Image: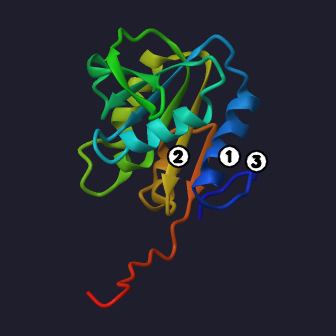
Amino acid sequence: MLAGDIVSKDTGVGGLIRSFRKIMSEIELKNKSLAFIGSPSLCLPFAELLAYGVKDSGLRMCFIPNVSKEKARSLKPDEGYGFRLGDKVPLGKVGAVIILGGLAMPNSPIGAEDINRLLPELLEKDGKVIGVCFMEIFGRVGWDKKVNFDYIIDTAIDPVRALKTGTS
């Protein structure tokens, strides 16, 4: 079980976005940047979704696949489509790093030690580390104890139901 003080409690995808927005407003990153770090295929859609949730913040945002900072690309609004990957960006220091839970999944080539090596290169002096995961993956693999998170947003998707309808 993940431990900490509850900042927000909500439900569904909208609740995930509202919780992220609440944390972003608490840490006040005006005129700063943030970097999402995640697995390229699994986490990118969630980074785009969360970026959309703070679209009016003025934050410069990028996505780093795995821990390959040389492959960082901007996250840019795409009118009518939400947020999408933009061009490669040189990475300087950022005000917050968002670590996405796909990196902690069993088949991921990334470990907590990889994240911990990258964080000092990315974070400004008082930068924040925010984890966003599903089904307590950070706690199940021990990352909540190995990575110095300032916040963790954990979302449960339970149950997942697939229904066959009609008479095909």
* Residue 132 tag number: 2
| Labels 1 & 3 near each other (Cβ < 8 A) | yes
Q: Residue at left 26%, top 49%?
A: 108
Tell me the crowding category of disc 2: few under 14, some 14 to 19, or many 20 or more residues within 10 angstroms, Cα based: many
Q: Residue at left 59%, top 65%?
A: 1
From what the image shows, is residue 91 above or below residue 153? above
- Residue type (three-letter) at the residue carrying disc 1: Ser
Q: CA distance from mark 2 to mark 1?
A: 10 Å
Helix, strand or loop status at disc 2: strand
Residue 56 located left or right of residue 81: right
From what the image shows, is residue 161 above or below residue 30? below
Q: Residue at left 44%, top 9%?
A: 92
Q: Nearer the viewer, mark 1 or mark 3?
A: 1
Q: What residue is pinned by disc 1?
A: 19
Residue 4 located left or right of residue 66: right
Mark 1 or mark 3: name the one nearer the start of the chain.
3
Q: CA distance from mark 3 to mark 2?
A: 14 Å
Q: Position of residue 9 (x, y in %)?
A: 73, 57
Quarter-wise, where is residue 154 in the image?
A: bottom right
Q: Residue furthest front?
A: 167
Tell me the crowding category of disc 3: few under 14, some 14 to 19, or many 20 or more residues within 10 angstroms, Cα based: few
49, 38: nearer the viewer:
49
Residue 70 located left or right of residue 64: left
Quarter-wise, where is residue 76 in the image?
A: top left
- Residue type (three-letter) at the residue carrying disc 3: Val
Q: Residue at left 73%, top 39%?
A: 22
Q: What residue is pinned by disc 3?
A: 7
Q: Position of residue 10 (x, y in %)?
A: 71, 58
Colouring: rainbow
Mark 2 or mark 1: name the one nearer the start of the chain.
1
* Residue 104 tag number: none
